[in-house]
Image (cartoon, rainbow, N blue to C red):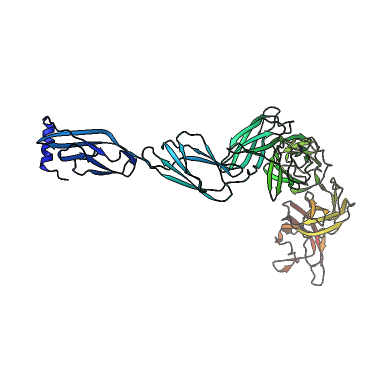
Amino acid sequence: MVLPKIIIGVLLSLLLGHQAFAQACFNANTVRGCAPLTITLTDCSNGTNIAYKYSEAEGFTDRNTNTYTIPGKYNITQIVQISGTGDSLRKQEYIEVLPTPLPEFELRMCANRKVSLNITDTQYEQCLVDWGDGSSVQVVSEGSPAIEHTYSSTGSFSLKVKGNYAPGGCGAEKAILISPVSALPPPTMESIITNTRGATTGAITLKMLTRPDFDYEIYASGNPTPLTTFVGISGTVTKTIDNLNTETGNICLKVKTLDKCGTSAESEAIYCYVSLKVTAGDGRNVLEWNPYLGSVPAGSFQQYVLYKNSQPFHIITNIGEGTYTDENVTCKENYCYQVVAEFASPTFHFTASTNAECVNAFSTQIPPTVGLLNATVETPRSIRLFWEVENQPRIAQYEINRNGTIVVSASQSQDLLDSDLQIDKQFCYEVRYTNICDNSSAWAVKVCPVFLSALSTEAGKPRLQWTAYQNPDNQLEGYVLQKLNERLQVYEEVELAPNVLAYTDANAKTDRQVMRYRIKSIIDAGADIVSYSNVVEVAQRFRLFFPNAFTPNANSLNDTFKPAFLFVKRFKMTIYNRQGEIVFQTDNIEKGWDGTYKGVPVPADNYAYFAEAEDNTGEKFTTKNSFILIR
């Protein structure tokens, strides 16, 4: 705003230090009130050219009203002019503009439709309370104790609390909807958890559903002194109580609800803790807990749920039961147990959980011997053993006794390949194992796969014998003699009774110089369990027979000179006359001499032959002799 020239002159006069005989004077219609606060100033100086400055952040203006929107204390300055002289008046913190926060208070429900109101606000000098039921507004000064009010009926009421500055006569109002109660609601205990088990160091944790209007006291049954007290909140709260005897003491609790008006209500139910002790026995863990002793609604007990390693594994429906033996354990394994008592009815839901108790299982039980132990020759230098055994407890190692030599294996497989052997005799094996409990089984009765040997070869009739197959179960259905080709493929089988331990092969093949045999032991044909012996090779000697005379005649059966033979691979024959001349040569054993030389028949006479031969095994042979050519 542009100030009049006379006001500017007055300001200059004041600034230059001229003395003014006129006196500035003004008053406000109000000096204290809530934002926004509008004030009007009245001049009492009888001067002219009046101007006002309403705050340090503003300049002078000739208006006599101002509205303050920001709470705080403000200075006002007035300047006036009288007969050419000026004067000013400054009033320090003359105007107080007040904030209007919502008033702070705490309201608690009480029994018998009472409520307790505690004004906690420190901003206002007083609060005006309208109970919402038509009763008179009640004035409560700052710092006053809590006040009570009784409603004549239940229902919903709008309670209004208005902050009030005095002086000022203004403030904000806060309204809430309330529903007075006729009686205190019973406390709701959700669970008791036994944290630790001990004679003096035990601890339990309570979980309760609470309301913010009430306080709660927890009593040990039969003791009038509360164990603990806590203020309720809206929802579930937890409370831990330490230094209890949870080892032998039967701690049962009652809960008392208290309102701010001096009324209390005690729970009908008696809530008890449950404590667990676990003892490791030989191959079993024994659980012991105190059966639930509390007073709860009839029919509300549902079950004890037993947990092992955080997983439920057993249910008990008898509330008086307090022991359980867990035999499904493995030695050296750690097991943690907990028992939870569960209660449920239309009006009652509660759980009591024991402490978690952990033990290491152990066992001294001797494990059973391996079962279905058998063995078979797998390669010319190895024998495979195979068996069955229980998987629990886990096996740490096997010991295999082979003809007095101990072999140790840490493999978990139920078989073993005994390799790098010289199978020149029968091998017998015993097997035992040690489990992770450090307990060893007995040696299983020995198993001995068949050892096959050849006694002799007579006129192309190999004679074979073998040792009896042995296994712990004395199970054997019979033997099968197998004939094998050079690729160890079976081309013929002969079934034999289980008491037969020798065989003469009268049907040895004349087209095979080397015969290969193996014994197949039929242990369980239905389960296809068999065992094989070592492979035996029987080499038959080659045969080469020359006649001592022949008759080169077309009608003769002996019309050429050549040998009879078996198993000859390579052959060369040279025939000489009496003078030492070569009359015939051949490397084809099937082609004989017809008694001619250069197409001309030679005379009857004595002749000589020299033969070189090699059989299928690489053995070489030479022979010479004479024969007669007859005409």
Quadrant location, the C terminus:
bottom right
Rendered location of residue 584, percent (x, y): 71, 62
**Residue sitting farthest toward the right:** 499
Q: In which quarter of the image is residue 33?
A: top left
Task: Work out whether residue 475 can be spotted.
Answer: yes
Given the current orientation, which residue lies at the most extreme bottom position?
A: 555
Left or right: where does residue 542 sit relative to residue 142? right
Q: x and y percent of residue 2 in the render?
A: 14, 45
Q: Is residue 116 depicted above or below 617 in this figure?
A: above
The percent position of residue 267, horizontal first and vertical second, equals 68, 40
Snapshot quadrant of residue 307: top right
Residue 501: x and y in percent read: 88, 50
Q: Looking at this view, is 579 or 515 the one in front?
A: 515
Viewer-closest of 514 and 174: 174
| Residue 332 sits in quarter | top right
Q: Nearer the viewer, residue 444 or 342?
A: 342
Number of marks in the rendered image: 0
Direction top: furthest residue:
200
Quadrant where the N terminus sits is top left
Q: Which of 307 and 616 is in front in this view?
A: 307
Residue 540 at least partly seen:
no
